[in-house]
């Protein structure tokens, strides 16, 4: 669904305002901004809950630290969304793009934090953000080495890797008392939450489907309250108002293997954001050029640096909000700016973050099964655009298998040197390395190892023009390409029919002339 640009009205002096640059009245702006916040809230808080919960189990965080991660995440997500929508010099695409922490980084961050401590996470995040800023202008070339075969495999691995986290939540493995782990009541609560998420997504109006996970968590928590499974002990001591503290958990440390792993993740995140930027440009009828793309990627990098400073994680554009723009037909970037301001305000309310820590583990597990399953399905959907051959199936199969080895056999690489073990013990980094290398080595037939070039860099002529070329960079938009081919085929058939009609008419004229001569 595309957002239409209004017709130009008035005199020649009147310059029409593109829907992206229109400013709704303040009350409507706040309501529309709140809608964007609700659409991304569950995804926004899920990453700090996942990483924080895992590192609490690993002894790297205290339970009281969890709400600090949540409010810091909301605070930086708000700043990032404002930068992306408003633009700050060459930072920001000036499009309606909400920013939030990326799921791609979850498993590597848990691995880094468990092995080297939380300060190593933030050191690697800061360096990755700087790298993202520096390579943004060159990414149009780098992104060609991330065709759908590569990105789809990596996203699939991310979803599969996170399912173990959801299983831990369902089992309630972080409970201090073993009697509270793996209980029948806990499994029932997780199942009920999952059913609620599915029901909302299946039966709710289209405008409410993006709230399915959030709705499931809220209803599941209410049920958990009656079952005695909630714990609000952190809410009372939490302050009502507070500003997130930079480097709250200590000065960042810089470990080479951790940085290498996170930089790979950063490149994948840039690929995600590239797709979202191009997609939103297509939705709002504002084609994305190279400068807009690089400015949007720089904003990702700056947000990621801020994430490392404020004790949170790498940032990317949220795809669900791209869908919301398409659904609502509200293209104004200032709506996203308002949503960013709302997130900043939520980030200044520690008590709100503490409320999140009271959610029962089993509720998060039920919602997590749906959420991480959807991440996996997203990767599979990307892979569905690939023209399959036996070689490409081998590349995907081997890469996923290598990525899953640490999950099915914990401690598999513990005797390797730390520098190497850190890389291969992260399923995502190991899978990414394998799929990139195999893609370059084995998938070279007809240039299959490369994604199409950005607009203006096409090596062959005669394809779709304008924003279609840009869209194909990451999205491999086969539907649009097929539609373009169908239109061309229809044009050709029309031309043939017209030629035949003209020939028939000429034959009639010739026959008439011959009859006159007789």
Image (tube, rainbow, N blue to C red):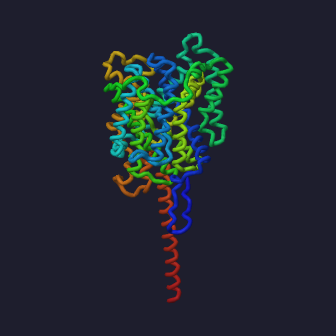
Query: In percent of the image, x 65 and y 30: which residue is there?
Result: 196
Is the residue 141 above or below the residue 252 in the image? below
Query: In percent of the image, x 65 and y 17: which residue is there?
Result: 228
Instruction: Report which quarter residue 371 is drawn in.
Output: top right
Nearest the viewer among 479 and 453 is 453
Question: Residue 408 at what x, y percent from top left?
Answer: 45, 20
Question: Residue 184 at what x, y percent from top left?
Answer: 63, 16
Question: Residue 30 at what x, y percent from top left?
Answer: 59, 44
Query: In percent of the image, x 33 and y 41: which residue is there?
Result: 135
Query: In percent of the image, x 43 and y 33: which residue is there?
Result: 307
Q: Is residue 331 left or right of residue 451?
A: right
Q: Is residue 131 left or right of residue 7?
A: left
Q: Residue furthest right?
A: 226
Is the residue 120 above or below the residue 396 in the image? above
**Is there any visible trace of residue 402 in the rendered image?**
no
**Is there any visible trace of residue 335 in the rendered image?**
yes
Is the residue 459 above or below the residue 8 in the image? above
Nearest the viewer among 489 and 463 is 463
């Amino acid at each position: 669904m595309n957002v239409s640009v209004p017709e130009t009205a008035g005199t020649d002096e009147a310059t029409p305002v593109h829907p992206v640059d229109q400013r709704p009245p303040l009350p409507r702006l706040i309501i529309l901004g709140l809608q964007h916040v609700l659409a991304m809230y569950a995804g926004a808080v899920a990453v700090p809950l996942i990483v924080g919960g895992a590192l609490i189990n690993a002894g790297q965080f205290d339970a009281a630290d969890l709400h600090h991660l949540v409010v810091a995440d909301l605070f930086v997500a708000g700043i990032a969304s404002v930068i992306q929508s408003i633009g700050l010099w060459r930072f920001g695409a000036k499009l309606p793009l909400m920013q939030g922490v990326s799921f791609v980084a979850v498993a590597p961050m848990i691995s880094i934090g468990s092995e080297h401590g939380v300060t190593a996470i933030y050191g690697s995040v800061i360096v990755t953000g700087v790298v993202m800023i520096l390579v943004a202008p060159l990414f149009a070339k780098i992104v060609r080495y991330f065709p759908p075969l590569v990105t789809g495999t990596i996203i699939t691995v991310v979803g599969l890797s996170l399912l173990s986290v959801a299983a831990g939540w369902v089992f309630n493995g972080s409970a201090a008392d073993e009697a509270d782990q793996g209980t029948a009541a806990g499994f029932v609560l997780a199942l009920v939450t999952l059913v609620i998420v599915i029901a909302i997504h299946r039966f709710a109006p289209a405008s409410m489907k993006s709230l399915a996970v959030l709705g499931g968590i809220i209803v599941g928590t209410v049920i958990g309250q009656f079952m005695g499974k909630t714990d609000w002990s952190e809410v009372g001591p939490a302050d009502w108002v507070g500003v997130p503290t930079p480097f709250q958990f200590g000065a960042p440390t810089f470990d080479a293997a951790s940085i290498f792993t996170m930089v790979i993740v950063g490149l994948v995140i840039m690929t995600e954001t590239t797709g979202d930027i191009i997609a939103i440009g297509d939705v709002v009828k504002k084609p994305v050029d190279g400068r807009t793309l690089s400015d949007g990627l720089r904003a990702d990098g700056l947000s990621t640096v801020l994430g490392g400073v404020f004790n949170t994680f790498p940032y990317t554009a949220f795809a669900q909000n791209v869908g919301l723009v398409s659904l609502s037909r509200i293209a104004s970037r200032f709506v996203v700016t308002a949503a960013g301001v709302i997130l900043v305000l939520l980030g200044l309310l520690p008590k709100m973050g503490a409320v999140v820590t009271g959610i029962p583990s089993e509720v998060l597990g039920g919602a997590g099964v749906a959420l991480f399953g959807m991440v996996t399905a997203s990767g599979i959907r990307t892979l569905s655009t690939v023209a399959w051959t036996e070689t490409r199936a081998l590349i995907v199969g081997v890469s996923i298998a290598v990525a899953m080895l640490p999950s099915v056999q914990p401690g598999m690489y513990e005797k390797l040197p730390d520098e190497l073990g850190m890389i291969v013990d992260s399923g995502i980094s190991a899978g990414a390395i394998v799929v990139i290398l195999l893609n370059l080595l084995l998938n070279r037939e007809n240039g299959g190892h490369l994604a199409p070039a950005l607009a203006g860099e096409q090596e062959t002529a005669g394809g779709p023009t304008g924003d279609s070329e840009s869209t194909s960079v990451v999205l491999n938009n086969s539907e649009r390409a097929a539609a373009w081919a169908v239109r061309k085929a229809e044009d050709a058939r029309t031309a043939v029919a017209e030629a035949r009609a003209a020939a028939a008419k000429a034959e009639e004229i010739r026959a008439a002339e011959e009859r006159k001569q007789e």
